[in-house]
Image (spheres, rainbow, N blue to C red):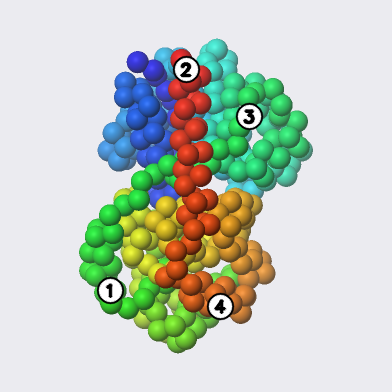
Amino acid sequence: MSNIVISGYYGYSNAGDEAMLSAMIDVLTEFDPQAHITVISGNPVDTKKRHGVDAVHRFHLPRISRALLKCDLLISGGGSLFQDVTSWRSLYYYLSIVTMAKAFGKPVMLYAQGIGPLRGKNARRAMRAVGNRVDVITVRDEGSRRELAALGITKPHIEVTADPVLAIHPANRNLGKTILAKSGVDLDKPIVAFAVREWETKNDYKKALAVTADRIIEELGAQVVYLPMQYPCDVEAAKRIRNKSRYKNAIFLEDEYTTTELLSLVGNVDLLVGIRLHALIFAGVMHVPMIGISYDPKIDRFMESVEGDCVSDLEQVTSDMLMESVRAKWMTRHQHDVKTESAVSGLRRLAERNAELALDFLR
């Protein structure tokens, strides 16, 4: 039996991160049904219940130490753990977990990481020192590989793979239909979903999104539905956007949903406009047309990998920009997008490669 410890941003009701963990656990146990997995989590009770694995609290040092001492491999990832934009404290936290595992003589894999941005000199120095001590690194895009090279991380085996969520299987759409109908959505009318978030202190983008939602309702006769990828903060962000709209009939999905429920919901919309990375990935998995708005290089990198539209970033986005992309996608929404589907299929195989490398390393 392999003992694997997974470190990441888990237990915080972020649907993207929980989907990532679910996909990682599924593919690891598919390749090795006997694997015993322990997750370092912000909410161990929820993680145990949600994913059926052992969990320890991310700030309970004795339990983390015991888990690492017993493990055969530490997996750090996936996601954007190694960056100092959202918080420099989190960067040093994740580096400290890796350092602890290495101090115990344990192998470490950075798993499907999105590296950077790393802006501070000390942050870059620390990342280089720790990164060159790990045993294998997979990154979810070419941009992250270039960032590793710029940091001077060259000693581990490095491969470009894909986000773990891309290995997840499409969900049945019936579950989403039931949720939408209960929320007051007319399933006989077209639906445009928005997956939004707060970002720093920026507010101009909210007005651009509000005006775009109004124009979608007016011009396309579509319903606007807001999907919460992180509960409850995304619901609050959506309400602030609607407050800037002329039409107040946009629909909020105000519950916390499982990965399967969110996939099913996305599968029932005609177009998704997303600031959240994993909402866009869900659209790719469910073969739904999507438009990305960037706040981080990971959005640009993913949209580039599926040959999709990344309209602008939150600093510069306007309603005119968005509507131009919305109209173009709307005209072709019923057409089979061979390029995107082929790209997502290739990324699925790369996402599975992460687990193959982890288990090959153990063997």
Direction top: furthest residue: 105
Marks 1 and 4: CB-CB under 8 Å? no
Left or right? Give the position of 61 relative to 203. left
Question: Disc 1 or 2, which lies upstream in sequence?
Answer: 1
Quadrant in the rendering for residue 52: top left
Residue marked by disc 2: 362
Of residues 45 and 350, the one drawn nearer to the viewer in this rendering: 350
Residue marked by disc 4: 323
At horizontal 48% and vertical 72% (from top left) the residue drawn is 332
- Residue 204: x and y in percent read 61, 72
> Distance of mark 1 from mark 3, alpha carbons?
46 Å
Looking at numbered disc 4 in the image, what kind of residue is underneath it? Answer: Met
> Distance of mark 3 from mark 2, alpha carbons?
16 Å
Question: Disc 3 or 2, which lies upstream in sequence?
Answer: 3
Marks 1 and 3: CB-CB under 8 Å? no
Marks 4 and 2: CB-CB under 8 Å? no
Looking at numbered disc 3 in the image, what kind of residue is underneath it? Answer: Ile
The quarter of the rendered structure image containing the N terminus is top left
Left or right? Give the position of 304 relative to 245. right
Number of marks in picture: 4
Residue 187 badge: 1
